[in-house]
Image (tube, coloured by chain):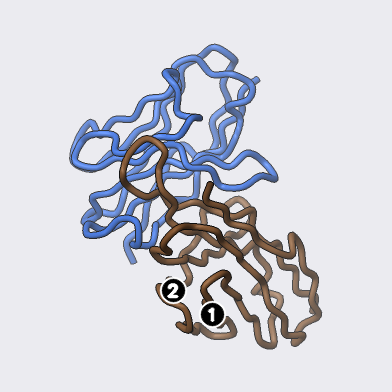
Chain colours: A blue, B brown
Amino acid sequence: EPEVTQTPSHQVTQMGQEVILRCVPISNHLYFYWYRQILGQKVEFLVSFYNNEISEKSEIFDDQFSVERPDGSNFTLKIRSTKLEDSAMYFCASSEIGRPYNSPLHFGNGTRLTVT
Amino acid sequence: EDQVTQSPEALRLQEGESSSLNCSYTVSGLRGLFWYRQDPGKGPEFLFTLYSAGEEKEKERLKATLTKKESFLHITAPKPEDSATYLCAVPSAATSGGSYIPTFGRGTSLIVHP
């Protein structure tokens, strides 16, 4: 069964450094998402992406964050200058074309980001 | 503001002891309700979608039901391998645009003891 893959599984970085989290969505999916989950808290929406542009973003997704689809398969989340509070599990997800708001999301297993 | 509330936060069951998890929502115009299972250190795994009141979906020991205000995930004769966090999500209106974003509840952490 096709799956969403994320790399790395764990990233440790120092405060102020830039990080790039990578995702390969399911190949025939056209809607892409980043969510994050701080330890013990709920899964929070960051950004959605369709047709090579951001379709929605949350208040969390400020100027320090950016997303890109550099080629036909990868989808990346960049944090320009990490803060301690960015420590969380970051999940990439994708869904099929059609009506994205009622298509189930398929998640990767996440990247655990630790900012020291 | 759209809200998704799950209860209980945590549930401990003995193997074979059936129970139900609740997801209540306040959205204007439900556009589907989703149940996911999340194992520790993993991403959420899709279980069910429900679209209209009265609808039911089943998968092995799990059955999801939907009313106009809430959804239940019934677990019949659970096994230890059913231990996980169960998440509920509904599409809620995005503040920045005209589309909808899958919004998650805090989940119910289920532990099934052998």
Q: Quadrant of residue A106?
A: bottom left
Q: Secondary structure at mark 1?
A: strand
Instruction: Where is residue B89? Give x, y as percent.
Output: 51, 59
Compared with residue A1, is residue A62 higher up or lower down, i.e. above or below?
above
Quick one: B48 or B26, which is closer to the camera?
Answer: B26
Q: Which residue is mark 1?
A: B65
The residue sitting at the top extreme is: A16
Q: Residue at x 69, y 82 (%)?
A: B78
Tag 1 and tag 2, C-beta contact below 8 Å:
yes
Instruction: Where is residue B65? Give x, y as percent.
Output: 53, 80
Q: Quadrant of the C terminus of chain B?
A: bottom right
Instruction: Where is residue B54? Give x, y as percent.
Output: 48, 84
Compared with residue B112, is residue B37 higher up or lower down, i.e. above or below?
above
Q: Amino acid at mark 1?
A: Thr
Disc 1 to disc 2, C-alpha distance: 8 Å
Q: Quadrant of residue B94?
A: top left
How many discs appear?
2
Q: Which residue is mark 2?
A: B50
The residue sitting at the front extreme is: B28
Residue A53 left/right relative to A33: left
Residue B22 left/right relative to B42: right
Badge 1: few (under 14), some or many (20 or more) residues near its Cα, within 10 Å?
many
Q: Are marks 1 and 2 on the same chain?
A: yes
Task: Please tell me which of labels 1 and 2 falls first in the chain.
Answer: 2
